[in-house]
Amino acid sequence: AQSVAQPEDQVNVAEGNPLTVKCTYSVSGNPYLFWYVQYPNRGLQFLLKYITGDNLVKGSYGFEAEFNKSQTSFHLKKPSALVSDSALYFCAVRPTGANNLFFGTGTRLTVIP
Amino acid sequence: DVKVTQSSRYLVKRTGEKVFLECVQDMDHENMFWYRQDPGLGLRLIYFSYDVKMKEKGDIPEGYSVSREKKERFSLILESASTNQTSMYLCASSPAGTENTGELFFGEGSRLTVL
């Protein structure tokens, strides 16, 4: 069965410091991997995705994510956090051949001024 | 700019009422989805549709039905609303075939409260 784990419900980081939001997955085959962000009372916005190729993918708003096949992880990173990055972040996977995405439970990021 | 529009941002209904949540996309996408979002549970797929008049059950279809009479519109129906259906409902769409890189395009969400 497919599953996505975001082990941290909450991540706090000081403004200007690097941030990491963790994601691991258990999916057969070669899945597509995604990060979405959700601001209060809004829908989900796409940040970045990994399909194939370079393990480090860059996305919107200065975010990047590193795909690690051996650890089945896809952690979201940013070198210098902004207060405006405070939001709810979701990791998602699309198994091979599927149309839908399976989402993690979300990690609330708070950037402290 | 691509857009998925959910007709109601906030709804309050009473137990037993029939509830319609409407979603329209203007991207000519074949695939459309309904998810519900609950704290600590993330997003869970209720139903999806890959073509007009076609539907597939997701992970939590009980208590829900859907309708897709036109390509751009996908409706979620709660035949008899219950308090445990109080949630945020998110509609999404994606293209099919070679255009489909997996990314879903989401609406703003409909927050339903059932009293």
Image: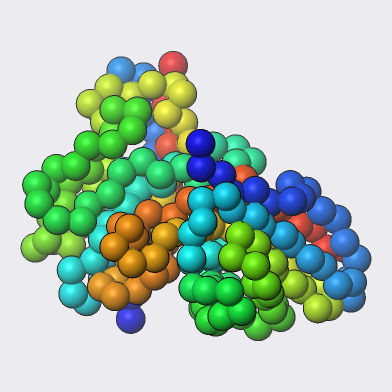
Residue A55 placement (x, y as % from top left): 11, 48
Is residue A43 found left or right of B16 in the rendered image?
Answer: left
Q: Is residue B38 above or below residue A36?
A: below
Is residue A16 found left or right of B27 in the rendered image?
Answer: left
Q: Quarter holding the C terminus of chain B?
A: bottom right
Residue A25 placement (x, y as % from top left): 27, 65
Residue drawn at (62%, 45%) of the image = B108
Q: Is residue B108 above or below residue B68?
A: above
Residue drawn at (64%, 55%) of the image = B24
Q: Is B66 in front, or is A101?
A: B66
Q: How is the image coloured?
A: rainbow
Q: Is A106 in front, or is B1?
A: B1
Looking at the rendering, which quadrant does residue B69 occupy? Answer: bottom right
Q: Is A17 in front, or is B46?
A: B46
Q: Is residue B115 above or below residue B2?
A: below
Q: Is residue B113 above or below residue B18?
A: above
Residue drawn at (46%, 31%) of the image = A86
Is residue B85 among what the camera can see? yes
Is residue A89 found left or right of B16 in the rendered image?
Answer: left
Residue A107 placement (x, y as % from top left): 42, 47
Is residue A10 among what the camera can see? no
Residue drawn at (90%, 66%) of the image = B14
Residue B16 placement (x, y as % from top left): 89, 75
Give the total number of marks visible in the rendering. Answer: 0
